[in-house]
Image (tube, rainbow, N blue to C red):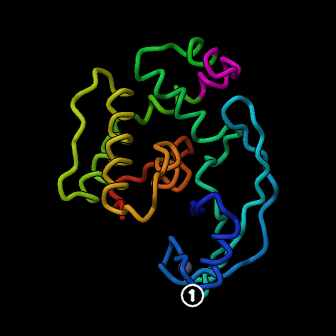
Amino acid sequence: MLTVEASAVSVEGRLAAGDLCCPCCAGVLAGWGWARERVVRGPGGRLTRLRPRRARCRACKVTHVLLAVLALARRADAAEVVGAALAAAARGAGFRLAAAGLGRPPETVRGWLRRFAGRAEAVRVFFTALAAAAGPDPVMPAAAGSPVADAVAAIAAAAVAVAARWPELGEVPVWQAASAASGGLLLAPGWPPAGRNTS
Ligand SMILES: [Zn+2]
């Protein structure tokens, strides 16, 4: 899986131009049908239908789903909504309070927070490395008081560093940047991979 911008027109243009690279071998991706439609629940419960493009690598022949950055793999809620819950937890809110603020079921939000808390240190390390790689002079977050808060602070620092390094990306919302940097896998099993670089 690979994350791409939300605009389908722009994704088609990049596929046609040979501008998207295979995450396995860096070969050029070509369009290869579409994945099953999914519905993503955004802030305020607004629903967005996505029909992710599928692409196949011309070199290694592996197919990849091009997931829009507003979504996360295997999550029905938008990255921005999940991120708001994680940010609330970073400020000390429990799952019930975070869920009430977002109008989401407490059990759902508890699942996000548990998954994130279980990988908070690995997430912090991943995004701190990303901020450093985007450099040259990233503002490194100070210790925020809990592993979850430190991880959320590192994500925010990485988003700032990436925006400063590549201004042509325009303003990328923090949690869309987090989705993009994690390949949509922020809360998926097996992420972040140990030792993988963050290019
Ligand atoms: Zn490939």
Amino acid type, mark 1: Ala
Q: Main secondary structure of the magenta part?
A: helix
Q: Residue at x 59, y 85 (%)?
A: 17
Q: Is residue 179 shown in magenta?
A: no
Q: Nearer the viewer, residue 53 or 113?
A: 53
How many numbered callouts? 1
The quadrant of the rendered image in which ligand 1 is seen is: bottom right
Q: Is residue 106 shown in magenta?
A: yes
Task: From the top left corner, tell me how far across and down residue 111 is, in percent.
Answer: 60, 27
Q: Residue at x 50, y 73 (%)?
A: 24
Task: From the top left corner, tell me how far across and down residue 138 is, in percent.
Answer: 22, 49
Q: Name the secondary structure under disc 1.
A: loop
- Stretch in magenta: 100-111
Task: From the top left corner, tell me how far across and down residue 183 is, in percent.
Answer: 52, 56
Callout 1: CB less than 8 Å from ligand 1: yes
Q: Nearer the viewer, residue 139 or 76?
A: 139
Quarter of the image for residue 100 reads top right
Quadrant (top left, top right, bottom left, bottom right) of the N terminus: bottom right
Quarter of the image for residue 15 reads bottom right
Q: Residues within 10 Å of mark 1 (few under 14, many from 20)?
A: few
Quadrant (top left, top right, bottom left, bottom right) of the C terminus: bottom left
Q: Is residue 141 left or right of residue 3?
A: left
Q: Is residue 109 above or below residue 130?
A: above
Q: Is residue 24 above or below residue 141?
A: below
Q: Is residue 159 left or right of residue 186?
A: left
Task: From the top left corner, tell me how far across and down residue 186 is, in percent.
Answer: 51, 44
Q: Nearer the viewer, residue 146 or 144?
A: 144
Looking at this view, name the residue that lies furthest to the left: 137
Q: Residue at x 42, y 53 (%)?
A: 193
Q: Is residue 160 left or right of residue 67?
A: left
Q: Disc 1 designates what residue?
A: 59
